[in-house]
Amino acid sequence: TFTLYLPLSDQGLVPAPVDVELPEPPTAPAEEPHLPADAPVELPPAPMRFHGEKVLIVDDDLRNVFALTSVLELHGLEVIYADNGITGVRALEQYDDVSLVLMDIMMPELDGNATMAAIRAMARYSDLPVIAVTAKAMKGDREKSLASGATDYVTKPVDTDHLLRLIAFYLGLEQD
């Protein structure tokens, strides 16, 4: 385990000069592609927007925490994190408004499966959605996590669109 300190402000940082050459604008407008009037148009899904629901990430790898936090906060979720199962259980005891947990499986001190079992043993959290987010993708890993109390199971590398849809589903929300 290591600690990484990041500056809270950019005070004292000097921006590097940047020389950029922009291309000349086209002289004639580009021709718009023409589709037949009856051609089906596939639109991308509407952006997912949450409303400040609190998600607890329990993962000992700060790179994973940072990547997940960036995506979740971008979509309107509030994130707290714990670096192992023991601090994850303590975080649930400290924050009574956690809406969902993203749980890594391979962690020191108390692994994700044992942590999920401990969470499920607490009557207050018996229905709390807990999504296992793990690199463990061998035969039987999914079943073991579900038996330990996971509501669902996502393998790394994480498909963030799929994860956001799962979170919305388990929070009972629709896409905006």
Image: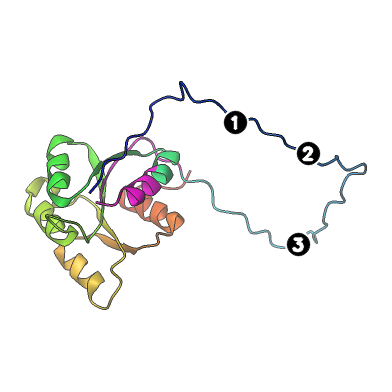
Residue matched to label 1: 16
Q: Secondary structure at mark 1?
A: loop
Mark-to-mark CA distance, 1 and 3: 52 Å
Report if residue 6 lies within the magenta region. no
Image spot of residue 11 (x, y percent): 46, 21
Question: Which label was assigned to residue 82?
Answer: none
Disc 2 to disc 3, C-alpha distance: 39 Å
Magenta residues, start to end: 49-69
Q: Is residue 47 left or right of residue 5?
A: right
Between the residue at mark 2 and the residue at mark 1, the CA separation in whole angstroms equals: 19 Å
Q: Which residue was labeled with disc 3?
A: 38
**Which marked residue is nearer to the observer: mark 2 or mark 3?**
2
Q: Nearer the viewer, mark 2 or mark 1?
A: 1
Q: Which residue is mark 2?
A: 22
Residue 111 percent location from the top left of the image = 16, 59
Picture residue at 40% right of the left edge, 59% below the top: 158
Labels 2 and 3: the sequence-earlier one: 2
